[in-house]
Image: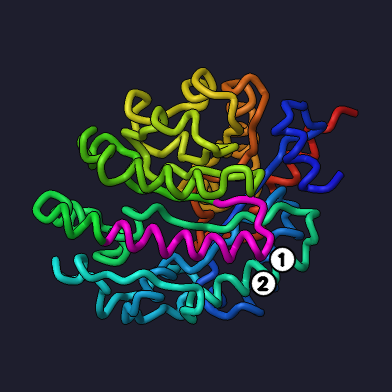
Amino acid sequence: MSATSRIKALLAGEQLARPAIAGWLHLPLVDRSPEAFIRETIRLTDENQWDFVKVMSNGHYLAEAYGADIQFSDDPTQWSGVFRRYPVASVGDLATLPVLGVDNPVLAREIAIVRGLVAHYRGEVPIIATLFTPLTWLQELTQSTRPEPILAFLRQHPDAVRHALDAVLQTNLNFLDALLEAGIDGIFLATQFARSDLLSAEEFHAFSLPYDEALLNHVKDKTWFNILHVHGEHHLLFEPYLNYPVQAFNWENVPHGVSDDLRTGVADLRARTDKLLITGIDQHQDFHVGGGDREAVKARLAQRLTQLREESGDRGIIFAPGCALPLDSDKRLFGLLAQLSLAQVPR
């Protein structure tokens, strides 16, 4: 049974003989070199028996496309580069942000990566392209992982932010059309603003949700496996997206040190949706248990898988991290996911 058949069976409500699994991690040494990136993605997918490819594009790719000056690290444990200049430093930059076409060298690079992966797997493994929502991209263009600067612009210069959101949305739509032509099976749409502690309800509905909707509606009926990644550990918002054309949610359900009243548990979300739930692992902690001791990590992951199956009613789940797998752990430990999944097959 191919990985694609397994995911389609899950979407049809079928029970798999063993749990589906997935993983992804930043590849900072090769993620701007298409041939090397494709090779490493294939190696990781095949060795770990992951049930879909989440294309782990360089996290700065749209900022790079918009002309950011970034010093990329040669440290294999550091995915993020150092920004020497951001594309957006002023209100004027927001108000004049252009729309990019797919002839942009960076976007062309990302399209070539997807095309290579699609050609290799030939439909046997789903290929899921990674995009950020427009407001998340504006954060990246303004201050990378820090939301405060773009939130200040949003509150003080809303018209300029709306122009920039429109430009980034159209750039994403142009990019999406090329990815669809390349043969993607879906998108992994990541938002860092589906959180009640960052935006007011009015701000969320004005500056986030409509642009997210536009991207999701653009792939509706053109792809079959779309994932919304709600980034963060607490105060997460799922309600506005429950009926949107995604087939799965990915999020951190067991973030270390976050109280139950602030996190979103699997049982809570399962009670609200029949969509696939891609989660279960605390990537920050679970691969470092016992100093990374293999048996300790295996025991922790087994516990996580049991918890995921129990809280979900053992339906519609893919055992996976809530975000990227850690770069500072022994990558051989990632193979434990397949080992645990195979151990669930009835004898």
* Position of residue 213 measured from the top left corner of the image (x, y, whole percent): 42, 42
Residue, x 46% and y 35% (percent of image)? 254
* Position of residue 197 measured from the top left corner of the image (x, y, whole percent): 23, 37
The reply to whether dot 1 and dot 2 touch (C-beta < 8 Å) is yes
Residue, x 33% and y 23% (percent of image)? 261
- Judge whether 42 appears above or below 51 on screen: below
Query: Is 193 or 70 nearer to us in this picture?
Result: 193
Residue, x 64% and y 38% (percent of image)? 318
- Tell me which amino acid carries mark 2: Ile
Main secondary structure type of the part rendered in magenta: helix
Q: Residues within 10 Å of mark 2 (few under 14, many from 20)?
A: many
Quadrant position of the C terminus in the picture: top right
Query: Is 101 or 237 nearer to us in this picture?
Result: 101
Does dot 2 land on a helix, a strand or a loop? helix
Q: Is residue 277 magenta?
A: no
Q: Name the residue under label 1.
A: 42
- Color scheme of the displayed model: rainbow
Does dot 1 land on a helix, a strand or a loop? helix
Quadrant position of the N terminus in the picture: top right
Question: In 3D space, how far apart are the residues under numbered discs 1 and 2 (Cα atoms)?
Answer: 6 Å
Q: Name the residue under label 2.
A: 38
Span shown in magenta: 164-187
Query: Is 242 or 277 nearer to us in this picture?
Result: 242
Q: Can residue 18 be seen in this view?
A: yes
Left or right of 91 on screen, residue 12: right
Left or right of 38 on screen, residue 132: left
- Judge whether 169 appears above or below 321 on screen: below
- Tell me which amino acid carries mark 1: Ile
* Position of residue 146 measured from the top left corner of the image (x, y, whole percent): 25, 57
Residue, x 77% and y 67% (percent of image)? 120
Left or right of 176 on screen, residue 145: left
